[in-house]
Amino acid sequence: MGERMRRLWHRGKFHSSALVLLVPLPFVPGQFGGNTVFDPPEIERTLTAGPYTVRVVTGDRGPHQEPTGDRMKDYAVHVTAGDADTIRAIFLRVGKPRSIRTLGALAEGNPYEREAEVVIPPTLSGAEELWLTVESWDGRFHQAALPLDQLLGGR
Amino acid sequence: MSGGASRSRLWFLWHSWLAMPVWAFLFFVCLTGTVAVVSSEIMWLADPALRASADGAPLPVSALIAAAEAAAPGGRAASVSWSGAHMAVGVGLFLPDGTMATAWVDPITGAVRGMSGNSTFRSFIRALHGWLLTYPTGWYAVTALAVPMVGSLVTGLVVYKRFWRAFLHPRVRWSQGERVMWGDLHRLAGVWSIWFIAVIAVTSLWFLVYVLLLDLGMGLGGRKPPVLLARDALPVTRTAPAIDTDAVLAAAVAAVPDMRLRYLSLPESAFDPVLVIGSSGQAPLLPDYVRINPHTAAVMDVTGGLEGASGIELTRTVMRALHTGDFGGLPVKLVWMVFGILLTGMVFSGMVIWMKRTARAMREGRHG
């Protein structure tokens, strides 16, 4: 048996880089819009800001570090079909925005599922809040907040 | 053994060993890359839905977008891409469930010919070739192959004495055994592919360096601040104002004369302009980017082409175009495909030669 394995290795070792071709396999479902086996489970919370009720979804995994040193976390904001056309923009920020110039990360992309990359402060006390601002096309702002703890993930 | 002989033997050893341990992976990357060059054309061949109908006056883009949105309940157009007169226009759609789809619309009749899901064959084969479907791990694995490729080219040119003679006196010995035949084919393909291997190796090396610098947080510079619409400039309405895509496109075409349209990207947020990408006749390697206010159709910014782009942007654009062969229409793509096949074949023939030589050496070693 050992001899056979040795001969197999001897003959096959120079073809072993073909094993790299196994790497893409677990990611094939992701390419077609599904989840890959490495995707963390999702956590989600429903928030109501004025007339709008949205679902905020994120992976259950801590913030990632950008090359610049910032800690960031990705959020998806799901909007119901009826609301998509009256919402001008959605912003997410850790901490209450002080003015409309500091609303935070703009959620972009699919109007039904907008994605935002939010800066997470380097140190957290545990009392921080995630603030959501919905700006409607009529120029009004609607806000909601919930403890960041509930949507931080990774614990 | 003289110094010269042992040195050339060392070069030869390097040439033999550089790609051999990774040959199967390299073969796969060369093969998928070759397919990726003509992936649009393969889709066109495989799926009649993607073919444009007979000649006629093309419909305005707004009609194509309307047809695509009507074909997918709740769908909102995200982009329009043109791949040449023979191909149906692809309208990217955002769907209410958060996914994307592409509607293939006949530019003449406005009929939706077909619908593909999140990923087309083209995007799949590009992702498989470029990053094994997993970024950045796969990206590094693939681009690292540039190192053995550059090495194989350089050592190959040193080992193959007076290789330029092969241009005038090509020689393939078909009947002197397989090893000799594969060796001759390897050398012949190599000599004719010197320029192509150099292009692919250097551009791949660039892809490695580029992402390495990004990951190390070294800004490459040259990035302009984004062009955005001011909040004060947005219309105040009850629902999102409709975008007059025809007026937007007309403004873009007027801003860059002789532009061949490639792509129109609709705003991903209320503050984004519409982006129109096209190539003008003078600089096919360098696309023009025109940003237009979706509500007024005023041109906000024109970059690209020969002027405007910074050194690093220019390098990035040129490197990508050279790597993919996507800068001169179908003829260039076909040249890239042919040489891609040759390169894939060289990886394979290199392995065959190595195995046959090793097999012989082992036999002789055992008996002698």
Image (tube, rainbow, N blue to C red):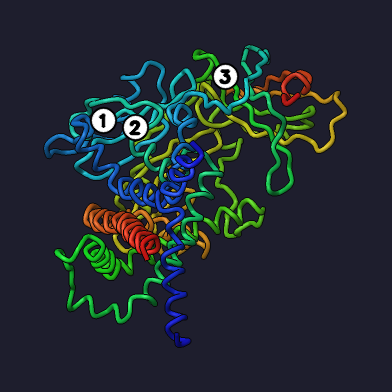
Label 1 and label 3 in one chain: no
Amino acid type, callout 1: Val
* Residue B127 at x, y percent in the picture: 43, 41
> Are the residues tagged 2 and 1 within 8 Å (C-beta)?
yes
Horizontally, residue A136 falls left or right of residue B35, namely: right
Which residue is under mark 3? A78
In front: B199, or B49? Answer: B199
Q: Residue at x 75, y 34 (%)?
A: A120
Q: What is the chain letter for disc 3?
A: A
> Are the residues tagged 1 and 3 within 8 Å (C-beta)?
no
Which residue is under mark 1? B105
Mark 1 → mark 3, Cα distance in angstroms:
28 Å
Which residue is under mark 2? B91
In front: B314, or B117? Answer: B117
Callout 3: 10 Å neighbours few (<14), some, many (20+)? Answer: many
Quick check: B33 above or below B179? above
* Residue A143 at x, y percent in the picture: 71, 20
In front: B213, or B188? Answer: B188
